[in-house]
Image: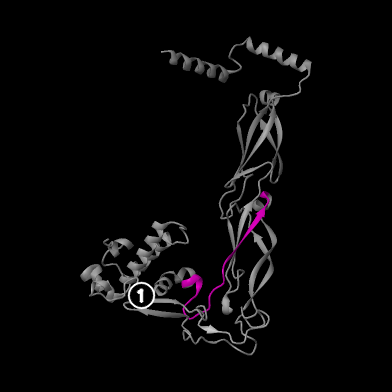
Amino acid sequence: MSKRDYYEILGVPKDASEKELKKAYRRVAMKSHPDRNPGDKAAEDKFKEANEAYEILSDSQKRNAYDQFGHAGVDPSAGGGFGGGFSGGGNFSDIFGDVFGDIFGGAGGGRGRGGPQRGSDLRYTLELDLEEAVKGTTVKIRVPTLVSCVECGGSGAKKGSSPVTCTTCGGVGQVRMQQGFFSVQQTCPNCRGKGKMISDPCGKCRGHGRLEEEKTLSVKVPPGVDNGDRIRLAGEGEAGPDGGPAGDLFVQIAVRDHALFERDGKHLYCEVPISFVDAALGGELEVPTLDGRVKLKVPLETQTGKLFRLRGKGVAPVRGGPTGDLLCRVVVETPINLTKHQKELLAELQDTLDDFGSKHSPRKKNWFDGVKNFFDDMKL
């Protein structure tokens, strides 16, 4: 099967600069990375294709050969290539580290070249009441994590000693196996990629350099947060191995359902039940807000579903802007458990209403007229 053009794979012109190549590769690789597309074979193939394209085009000699001879110029099986190819002597970890290092701190989840690996980020879901989310609060949380061992300073070696260079890989952390034209680079099985070995491990952490611990942290929740918002606590994640810097803790907000209010962005909604008499004759009601009770004037002849807006009684957005409103939806409640006398009064009222035809129920008349027209049209 013929291979696709490398420039086409990355979506760049043939005169693209090194910076443009790296930016294009990062965009394609991030979109099709297997971690973001688990089980997606097509995405995995695109990811491998992008890696191969970038390895060739990021090397000036290989790029010149490719520009002159196409895939034959860089394919060792073609007899005239550079012998690297994607499956050959190319160092995939170097490619990955170059492009993703500025995002993740280096290849392999944050390991910078020549530097200790950064610890993992943690996530904590914090449940809040609506009032706490709207007005802000301070909450203490307990988070299980890995902390650097104080006894050995995170090195894993016994106090007074230090790790020694791995004799298998010579401190590189990787070993290379050569088979004809092909060479495969793998993580050193002896030091597991660290490049160093601990001959005399710390008695407290047993050579791991980190210990499991539960930390108590104080989280300041700003007013106006909503479901899905995250609060970043820098350096409160897991400590990095070998004394590396700690990751971050991301506190994700989850707002509990409220008995009275529903939130939609900066606005609040609530249903206000009113009696048949109040809806017909009008009146004044007390309605709840997050700041206390307020008076709501209901005009006469109010229909169910009518929305009343109380300006400024909603939520002040966490990222700034005007405070939202509280929208009260009126629901006219049908009376129940009527006495005989009350039923007689309602029947009498109905008789008086019928005497005036559709004057008191225009929507009812329009609806029945619509039904009649619908069935008349069906007969045609």
Q: Residue at x 71, y 16 (%)?
A: 346
- The span picked out in magenta is 107-130
Task: Confirm whether residue 74 shows in the render.
Answer: no
Task: Estimate the x, y position of residue 167 in percent, counting from the top left.
Answer: 49, 87
Task: Estimate the x, y position of residue 53 in percent, counting from the top left.
Answer: 32, 67
Quarter of the image for the C terminus: give it. top left
Q: Is residue 334 left or right of residue 69?
A: right
Q: Residue at x 64, y 90 (%)?
A: 160
Please say whether residue 56 is one of the residues in the magenta stretch.
no
| Placement of 45 over or under 344, stated as above or below | below
- Point out the residue furthest to the bottom here: 160
| Placement of 139 over or under 17, stated as above or below | above
Residue labelled with disc 1: 90
Q: Secondary structure at mark 1?
A: loop
| Placement of 217 over or under 295, stated as above or below | below
Q: Nearer the viewer, residue 218 or 236?
A: 236
Quadrant for residue 21, please give it.
bottom left
